[in-house]
């Protein structure tokens, strides 16, 4: 599904990713943890194709395609989805029109006709009930006047609508209370399937009580310094990150 | 002496950059042009061009008053003919009509004086007490030909409780040049209501000057939209005077110039008595090497207590070569008022663009979504849906959304 090899990226003169390696197979859910400034969000942004970062070396192979060669919208049409840490408000663009445009762009890419109004509304209904996004929020401008929790639920709603092959969740849990976290996690778990992979970036181990990862990686100074199963998250919760300074070489067979 | 000033003389001098009102809209190029007002030039040789429909909003059932190069075209027009509405071009008006207007624009401005001196025709329109005109009336001006000048002037009176929707639409065929100098004077009686949409969609190279002078009596409601879709050099002036208590005035506008187009909007909202409300929203996106000018004056006179005046002008400069000169001007002499104004100049929101693109929508379509959203606040207040959709269609056709 996704093979990241020796990825280096920088902002200005600031190297943020320093030779990151990661492989994600279909159906797997990988959690990426790490201290502030370790490069977690940069990794998400680079995978989604943000122009703010410059990839200086390395490769990202996504289902046989060179992902770095595609611009942002092409990556999305190929099946990459990024749930933003800070979803953007877009006044004047209705949530539904936005989703319809996105869905139809993806369908056109696959050579399909635009979705029928009836099918679209049925899909909206199904996906919004998944994250308890009520009609009022659905019909409003994208994220405008949404609370933090509503914005995050809207991200998962969009993910459900667009059915990506690879979903990257950038700190979707931060700023959520337990109830909202449960709703969001339920949505994510409902989306898990054997052909859909997830990279879940989080600051807090708490999320991983609700979304059980197959692998946990620790990012430090722009590369993965430790990988393990879900127990690693608990270990990190107890010990913090300080014991993981140097890259380890016992990365499991990923 | 240039060709232009030989043909058109006025006692007032043409404005120069030294005048604050014309600082960013110099007319030196106009004065070098060869423009005439001869009847032959005005009528053209080709009749009405096929590419332009006499009713510019085909889907809209409306009355139309068609003027070509300033001359009324009776065969292409369809004027209301019902009780309580007097609608007739001045050239066909037998008596003078009872008009009470106090506009002194022709004494203040060179452009106004030219209109006064060389005025050809215009619509005389009176809506009687408590009469609602059943359809919008579109005044359609076409400039067609090289070096043509037209000087229309329209008079509108909506009596107490009357209701009218007017569209002033100006077109020009692509090989046209010259000058359009149009004035509209309107007065609204107590509790009357007027919607006015000004649409400029001119091909060719026409210097377009338009001036609206509107007086509002108590409790009257005015809604003006100024849409510049296309125009080589356009100056829109609005002068709204609230002369009765409790008036409501909405002044909205949008401009999206491309290439080397020049679009100037000058507005004046004058609250002279109390309890008036005015809201003004102008949005512009400057592309290419175009220039935009916005000047919005709001006066709140000493007696205009409890006035609520709001003005906002938001601009996006989309390309390096484009520029906007924006200037809000508020003069407040009353002490119990609520006035707010805001003026911004910025670029497309890169974070929003990235967000939209990250959902699979390509950059051009993403920008179109943002532009449409940007315009929506102005467009959505146009009540007539056929008109609103046609304006949006013309913008999107022009900008290839």
Image (tube, rainbow, N blue to C red):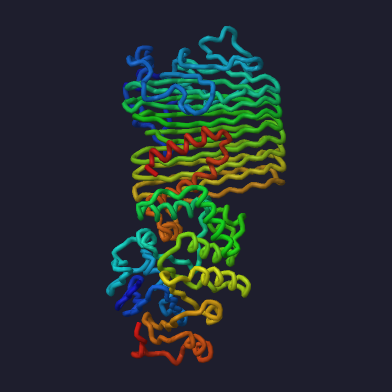
Q: Foreground: B285 or B148?
A: B285
Q: Quadrant of residue B271?
A: top right
In the rendered image of this protein, does residue A116 appear above or below residue B39?
A: below
Left or right of residue A252, residue A116 in this image: right
**Which residue lies at the image location 54% right of the left edge and 54% below the top edge?**
A122
Could you tell me residue A143's position as x and y percent? 54, 59
- Viewer can see residue B1: no
> In this figure, what is the number of numbered marks?
0
In the rendered image of this protein, does residue B379 appear above or below residue B171?
A: below
In the rendered image of this protein, does residue A117 appear above or below residue B31?
A: below
Could you tell me residue A136's position as x and y percent? 62, 55
Q: Foreground: B186 or B171?
A: B171
Could you tell me residue B25's position as x and y percent? 41, 36
Which residue is situated farthest in the top direction here? Answer: B94
- Viewer can see residue A29: yes
In the rendered image of this protein, does residue B391 appear above or below residue A147?
A: above
Specify the quadrant that holds the C terminus of chain B.
Answer: top left
Left or right of residue B129, residue B54 in this image: left
Q: Foreground: A77 or B171?
A: A77
Could you tell me residue B250's position as x and y percent? 60, 38
**Which residue lies at the image location 70% right of the left edge and 29% below the top edge?**
B191
Specify the quadrant that holds the N terminus of chain B.
Answer: top left
């Amino acid at each position: 599904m996704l093979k990241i090899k020796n990825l280096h990226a920088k902002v200005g003169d600031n190297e943020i990713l320093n030779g990151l390696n990661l492989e994600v197979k279909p159906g797997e859910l990988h959690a990426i943890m790490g201290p502030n400034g370790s490069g977690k969000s940069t990794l998400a942004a680079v995978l989604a194709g943000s122009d703010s970062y410059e990839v200086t070396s390395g490769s990202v192979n996504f289902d046989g395609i060179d992902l770095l060669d595609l611009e942002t919208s092409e990556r999305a049409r190929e099946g990459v989805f990024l749930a933003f840490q800070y979803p953007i408000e877009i006044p004047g663009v209705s949530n539904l029109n936005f989703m319809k445009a996105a869905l139809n762009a993806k369908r056109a890419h696959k050579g399909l006709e635009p979705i029928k109004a009836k099918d679209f509304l049925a899909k909206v209904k199904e996906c919004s009930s998944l994250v308890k996004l009520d009609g009022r929020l659905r019909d409003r401008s994208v994220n405008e006047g949404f609370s933090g929790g509503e914005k995050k639920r809207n991200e998962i709603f969009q993910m459900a609508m667009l059915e990506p092959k690879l979903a990257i969740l950038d700190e979707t849990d931060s700023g959520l209370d337990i109830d909202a976290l449960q709703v969001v996690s339920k949505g994510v778990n409902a989306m898990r399937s054997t052909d859909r992979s997830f990279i879940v970036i989080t600051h807090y181990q708490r999320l991983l009580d609700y979304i059980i990862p197959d692998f946990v990686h620790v990012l430090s100074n722009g590369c993965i310094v430790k990988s393990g199963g879900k127990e690693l998250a608990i270990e990190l919760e107890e010990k913090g990150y300080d014991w993981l300074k140097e890259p380890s070489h016992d990365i499991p067979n990923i | 002496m240039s060709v232009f000033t030989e043909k058109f003389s006025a006692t007032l001098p043409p404005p120069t950059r030294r005048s604050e009102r014309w600082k960013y809209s110099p007319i030196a190029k106009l004065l070098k042009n060869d423009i005439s007002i001869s009847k032959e030039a005005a009528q053209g040789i080709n009749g009405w061009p096929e590419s332009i429909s006499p009713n510019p909003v085909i889907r809209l059932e409306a009355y139309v008053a068609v003027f070509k190069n300033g001359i009324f075209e009776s065969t292409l027009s369809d004027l209301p003919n019902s009780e309580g509405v007097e609608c007739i071009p001045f050239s066909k008006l037998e008596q003078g009509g009872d008009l009470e207007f106090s506009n002194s624009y022709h004494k203040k401005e060179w452009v106004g004086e030219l209109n006064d001196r060389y005025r050809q025709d215009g619509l005389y329109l009176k809506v009687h007490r408590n009469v609602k005109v059943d359809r919008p009336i579109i005044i359609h001006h076409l400039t067609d030909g090289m070096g043509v000048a037209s000087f229309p002037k329209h008079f509108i009176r909506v009596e107490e409780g009357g209701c009218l929707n007017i569209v002033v639409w100006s077109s020009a065929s692509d090989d046209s040049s010259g000058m359009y100098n149009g004035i509209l004077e309107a007065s609204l009686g107590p509790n009357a209501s007027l919607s006015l949409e000004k649409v400029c969609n001119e091909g060719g190279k026409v210097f377009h000057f338009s001036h609206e002078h509107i007086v509002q009596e108590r409790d009257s409601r005015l809604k003006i939209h100024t849409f510049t879709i296309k125009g080589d050099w356009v100056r829109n002036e609005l002068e709204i005077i609230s002369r009765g208590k409790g008036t409501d005035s909405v002044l909205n506008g949008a401009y999206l110039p491309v290439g080397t187009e020049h679009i100037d909007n000058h507005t004046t909202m004058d609250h002279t008595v109390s309890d008036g409300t005015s809201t003004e929203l102008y949005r512009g996106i400057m592309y290419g090497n175009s220039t935009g000018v916005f000047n919005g004056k709001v006066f709140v006179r000493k007696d205009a207590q409890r006035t609520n005046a709001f003005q906002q002008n938001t601009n996006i400069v989309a390309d390096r070569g484009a520029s906007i000169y924006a200037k809000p001007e508020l003069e407040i002499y009353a002490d119990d008022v609520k006035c707010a104004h805001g003026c911004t100049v910025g670029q497309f929101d890169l974070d929003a663009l990235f967000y939209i693109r990250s959902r699979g929508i390509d950059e051009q379509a993403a920008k179109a979504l943002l532009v449409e959203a940007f315009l929506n606040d102005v467009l959505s207040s146009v009540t007539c849906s056929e008109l609103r959709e046609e304006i949006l269609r013309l913008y999107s056709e022009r900008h290839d959304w």
